Amino acid sequence: MYIERTLSKVIREATESFPVVLITGPRQTGKTTIFEQNIEPSRTYVTLDDPQIRTLAVNDPHLFLQTYRPPLFIDEIQYAPSLFPYIKMEVDKTRQKGLFWLTGSQQFNLMKDVSESLAGRVAILELQGLSQAEKNGQNALPFLPDTLAPDNRPTYNLYSLYETIWRGSFPELHANLNLNRTLFYSSYFKTYIERDIRQLMQVSDEHRFLTFVKTAAARTGQLLNYNDMAKDVDVSANTIKSWISVLETTGLIFLLQPYHNNIANRTLKTPKLYFFDTGLCAYLCGWETAKTLASGAMNGAILETYIVSEIVKSHRHNGLSVNIWFYRDRDKKEIDLLIERNGVLYPVEIKRSASPKTDDVKHFNALTRMGLQTGKGSLICLYDKLLPLNDQVTIVPVGYL
């Protein structure tokens, strides 16, 4: 069962505007499938997962592009970076749009080669796992508090929400509901270690790296403290920094930076760590059921992770960069998210509650006191209706993400 992806529309638009379209993102998020669903009969598909085809692409890229003529879809392009200069020459020779579709895991060398060889010629899109809106067949618009309107969005109670969080967002888990979730994540992570990690870096002790990833998962939604993680994993802080960069580059995590400018000079400078897929995060932390996750020590952090991830995906799957931060100052005033659009800051608070209160958003006024331009705020929670909390803040049920 194919679930329609928001990025499909962006792919079609990018194909009409750019010679090359590249989709990056973690493994098994549907990069190949989304291109296959939009492919034209005239476009040739070739995957570099095939050892013989990969050997040709690596050793004789000129012959490869004589053998496989554009319009061409090359899957797993990161295996043959030597193709990029030849793709550039083909693009510059014909000046046609939509010549090449490429997929690749988000890796250091891949993005470096793309930026050096195809600058100005490539649209780079990112595909993460299924968004909540995609799962529910809803119109997945970029989340912004002042664009929300009441409609027939699904209502989540505590346990249906944590079932969604626990299961995660990988398309295969939703296309096949009988698939063993634990076996899926176990196999996924084994493949991730054996393919992506070994490609990117030399890890002499895979057991210690696994401990590191589990340590990172247990800290989702928290301030990133390299020294504390280094003590838990028994490696240096520099090693933790290097490994965090790998998780970020391969699309498993993202770092949410604190808001800071010349006015807000009393804010903290430390980023927060979030996993993109809450199912993988819950698996790594050993939560065996959605019920135990909902009542366990991580229930607040994993909910915050889910909501922040959904907001980020709602923008990236629409082909948009998203400017978001969190706010925390030395007086311990906190705002979970600030979304910036056209110079306006939209504050967002996240609560694991079905009884929203005005006091929940009391720190929003810190932005006003600093003279920052703010838009409508939102309080995302388990309440079941989209309603005004006051004239500046809207109560947003989780189902509206």
Image: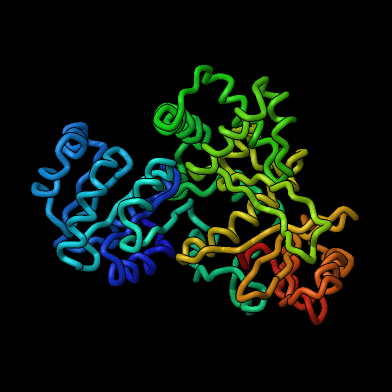
The residue located at (73%, 46%) in the rendering is 270
> Camera-side residue: 245 or 284?
245
Q: Residue furthest bottom?
A: 391
Whether residue 202 is situated above or below residue 72 in the rendered picture? above
Residue 144 position in % (x across, y down) = 62, 72
Q: Where is residue 322? Give x, y as percent.
A: 57, 63
Quarter that holds the C terminus: bottom right
Residue 214 at what x, y percent from top left?
A: 62, 30
Left or right: residue 203 versus residue 365 is left
Q: Which quadrant of the structure image shows residue 265?
A: bottom right
- Tell me how the rendering is colored: rainbow
The residue lying at 66 percent from left, 66 percent from top is 339
Residue 300 visible in the shown view: yes
Q: As rendered, which of 353 and 326 lies closer to the eye? A: 326
Is 89 drawn above or below residue 142 in the view shown? above
Question: Residue 330 appears at what percent x and percent y?
Answer: 87, 53
Residue 310 lies, with reference to residue 165, above or below; the image says below
Q: Is residue 160 visible?
A: no
Q: Tell me where residue 154 sits by quadrant.
A: bottom right
Number of numbered tags placed on the structure image: 0
Q: Where is the N terminus found, in terms of image quarters?
A: bottom left
User: What residue do we see at 70% from left, 41% from top?
Assistant: 224
Q: Residue at x 15, y 62 (%)?
A: 93
Seen in the image, is 84 located left or right of residue 272? left
Compared with residue 199, is residue 99 higher up or lower down, i.e. above or below? below
Residue 338: quarter of image:
bottom right
